[in-house]
Image (spheres, coloured by chain):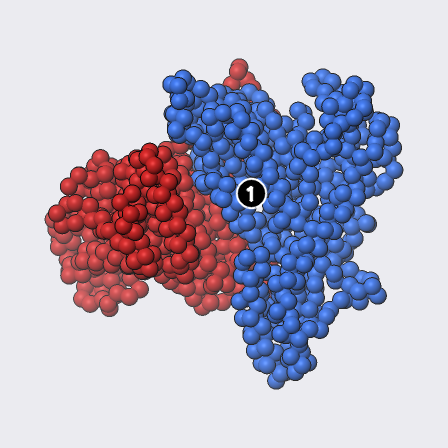
Chain colours: A blue, B red
Amino acid sequence: MKHALPVTRDQDFAAWYQAVISEADLAEESGVRGCMVIRPWGYGIWERIQALLDAEIKRTGHENCYFPLFIPLSYFEKEAEHVDGFAKEMAVVTHHRLIQQDGRLVPDPDAKLEEPLVVRPTSETVIGAAFSRWVQSWRDLPVLINQWANVVRWEMRTRMFLRTSEFLWQEGHTAHATEAEAREETLKMLEVYRAFAEDCLALPVIAGEKPENERFPGAVATYSIEAMMQDGKALQAGTSHFLGTTFSSAQNIRFQNSEGVQELAQTTSWGVSTRMIGGVIMVHGDDDGLRVPPRIAPHQIVIVPMLRDGPEDAAVLEYCAELLGALQALNAFREPVRVLLDRRPAKAAIKRWGWVKKGAPIIVEVGGRDVAGGNVSVLRRDRLYKADGKLDSAILSKADFISSAADMLTDIQATLHAEATGRLHGNIDRSIASIDALKAHFAASAKPGWAEVSWSKPTGDALEKVVQWLKSEKLTLRNVPLDAAPAEGACIFTGEPAVERVLVGRSY
Amino acid sequence: MKHALPVTRDQDFAAWYQAVISEADLAEESGVRGCMVIRPWGYGIWERIQALLDAEIKRTGHENCYFPLFIPLSYFEKEAEHVDGFAKEMAVVTHHRLIQQDGRLVPDPDAKLEEPLVVRPTSETVIGAAFSRWVQSWRDLPVLINQWANVVRWEMRTRMFLRTSEFLWQEGHTAHATEAEAREETLKMLEVYRAFAEDCLALPVIAGEKPENERFPGAVATYSIEAMMQDGKALQAGTSHFLGTTFSSAQNIRFQNSEGVQELAQTTSWGVSTRMIGGVIMVHGDDDGLRVPPRIAPHQIVIVPMLRDGPEDAAVLEYCAELLGALQALNAFREPVRVLLDRRPAKAAIKRWGWVKKGAPIIVEVGGRDVAGGNVSVLRRDRLYKADGKLDSAILSKADFISSAADMLTDIQATLHAEATGRLHGNIDRSIASIDALKAHFAASAKPGWAEVSWSKPTGDALEKVVQWLKSEKLTLRNVPLDAAPAEGACIFTGEPAVERVLVGRSY
């Protein structure tokens, strides 16, 4: 069986990942350090993610706003822990004009900013400043807002979608009168992310609380959803933070409660980014390229006419146009089906393999023989090959295909989710009861998956010791699953009585 | 007649504009120099603009991408005219890390970038670099792309929505094999903008070519749509540029034509921004606040229950919920009607005036008496008062309102457009035949509107002389309308034979 990519997952997973991105025209290096160009197919997936998640963010009562890209240094100085977390990787604007000097452009020394500005790495500080203007009384609470924006973190080692200097994301920010309400919000949005990942991205995830060492700088509690890539590594695919009064005290978000007493608001923040697309690639991709879950596919069905530069071409194109119209009138997932008729002049086989690599869920080919017989040739991207290694292209009557297309999309979405769910749950070892067994587990296989182990939830130096040992084994703590079984016995790291179960794994 | 704003248009138009923005909760100063916070009602209008315009951009064959925020200085050095146009107002990133020094955060001198990066003021250079990778053969053309993004121009004097250091926009960029095709694209997108402004924003505009002195830096030809504000000033609401080979030669966008010969691609770019919201405010606002055209209103109908903290409240709320459901099932402008039931605990009159100031197209009030009679009280934002100065609130049966609501929205959209169109066409003086008459025209009135005059289309120094004289009169050349009558007689500026008609006016 010959595959469409130059490298397979088994040969070199990292090279395969780059090959998918390149061959599916998802993104490319931009020439600007650490920044990528997101091409139409990649951006189209992001637009679908935005549309679906935005609807959920609004359904849960949040409104979109837009806050400044630039944050004055003084905003960061107010919150020491937060700035410590980000200072090492901030892009700093220091000048507002360029001049020519010896034939080169240089920042104008006469146009130096009095106070340098940081390009936002995240917006708690600047949004907190707005909240402090908006919130005076308990009647002004809760404040529930979100923004879709670009952010910059000057990463030293970058990888497309997973870690880029600039990336696109949404960041929700809320302020509440009580800790209980803010904690409830934090978990509500974690659940929105979990359900979105499962239902829309077909990405099974484990939702849980991050250990102390993995908390967002300034957070009281950080929760994440963790997805398992096909190489067994974990990808943190979204986070939700309970921030307590860290930012309300730094940015002075105070309100008069119903008894007339001044209180600090309790805030939260939560975000997902273009990183999710990296997760979709590494969970659903195969050796022929990407497989896009139908709910986020820019085109769910692509019609490829097989033209021969002959007199029958007109009839083929007319037949395809009719098919296009009939399919566009259908609904799948309560939305109109997204169909493309690929009229480009290239050969049908080249176009077919282009769409295979891009991962369009259904590819329909139509030639003169299909027109004569009233048929179409249907290729499902989730099951490309038959057992004998040949392409599993099915001839269906046009009418049958039209009446089954929406169900087929639903089935492809479910199949991708089921495959990934099986892989996730089949690759979490819950039986490991000692540090030696843990070490052996991760040494025994190239794709060891994760281990869920009992631990005593150490803090401070004791936790740091555990983290350093894990680091020496190239392992990290992922999260404490919300739905894990109760812990029993001793902590495998400290030997003390275990209080909860924590996930351990390699990670991106 | 008492109005909801603290200042009227006639008293102080500039102060009125700020008052609308503030009282309608559209946006606010952020505390970051020249940058605003766009609040939910303002951002909701932008989301509607995005959705409607994006559909047109896609319908005309363009795909969305995303390109880097940062542009290396060397990209700008390749195109002298372009850099001259923007160098004076560029935000420059020079460092990638902060450190603590004497208790303050400062850029780390050890983390200075080898090559400073500019925060994009526009993306011709970085997108041109991508095009040069994408285009090899005539088969790769045309390239038709768009991006929705933030851009930064370090403006010295800023005004919310109209001129801010950071703003949101879309920028389309295309590359073509021939000049004719690129020129056609430039005019096609100008027409998309014209139709969008008229149909969706209810903004009548004059589409035309900008004179040489107003061209985009690097463009061969710049076209604009110009809208007339209620103070008679012009607002450039969108531009489309034919760039010729300026950027393809600077960025090396070459292709092999069908005869095997290397050629430079012909490129275009075109954009509209959050500035359009400023235009909507200044065209449709009145002394009670904003009036949002229904097509771009985040909520087209707002239901305000009149609650008395009494036993009848439950029936009122139930009645409102039924009304909400019935209205949400309607379509207007081929989309579901957007309805809000305002359940906030405030008094009905306070909520009503809040929605008047925000400009919700239809406000429906429901009290106990309405429930008993099966009625609703309907306030149309486009005709708030009766001739006697009282609120023009109409009692309609609930059934009648539901069956007429979609038509009412269509009528409000048409009314706003007709009002503004009458004002635009009633305030362009086409009879002025001398420079003295021009001067007298603009001296005679506080709201002189525009003049369309014959001119000889001078270039270079001769044009500069005209521009300087106009500047001394606080006037500018707006554009040469595409549909102007042929020019007759002599140029009012140079005395030479006139070749075309040009619009003159004060402007934002």
A223 left or right of B360 in image: right
Q: Position of residue B365 (x, y in %)?
A: 29, 45
- Whether residue B424 appears in this view of the structure is no
Count of numbered labels shown in the rendering: 1
Please state the horizontal and vertical placement of residue B129, each as a whole percent of the image: 56, 51
Whole-percent x, y for residue A173 in the image: 50, 33
Disc 1: host chain? A
Say if residue B327 shows up in the picture.
yes
Which residue is painted at 37% across and 51% down in the image?
A: B323
**Residue A407, quarter of the rendered image:** bottom right
Does dot 1 land on a helix, a strand or a loop?
strand
Dot 1 alpha-carbon crowd within 10 angstroms: few under 14, some 14 to 19, many 20 or more: some
* Residue situated furthest top in the rendering: B102
Quadrant, the C terminus of chain A: top right
Image quarter in which the N terminus of chain A is found? bottom right
Q: Is residue A306 above or below residue B128?
A: below
Which amino acid, mark 1?
Answer: Leu
| Residue at (24% x, 42% y) in the render | B288
Q: Residue at x 18, y 63 (%)?
A: B490
Q: Could you say which is closer to the camera, residue B360 or residue B37?
A: B360
Q: Residue at x 30, y 51 (%)?
A: B374
Pointer 1: what residue? A168
Q: Quadrant of residue B184?
A: bottom left
Q: Nearer the viewer, residue B303 or B280?
A: B303
Judge from the rendering whether residue A353 lies leftward or rightward of residue A80; answer left or right.
Answer: right
Rendering coords of residue A421 (x, y %)? 73, 47
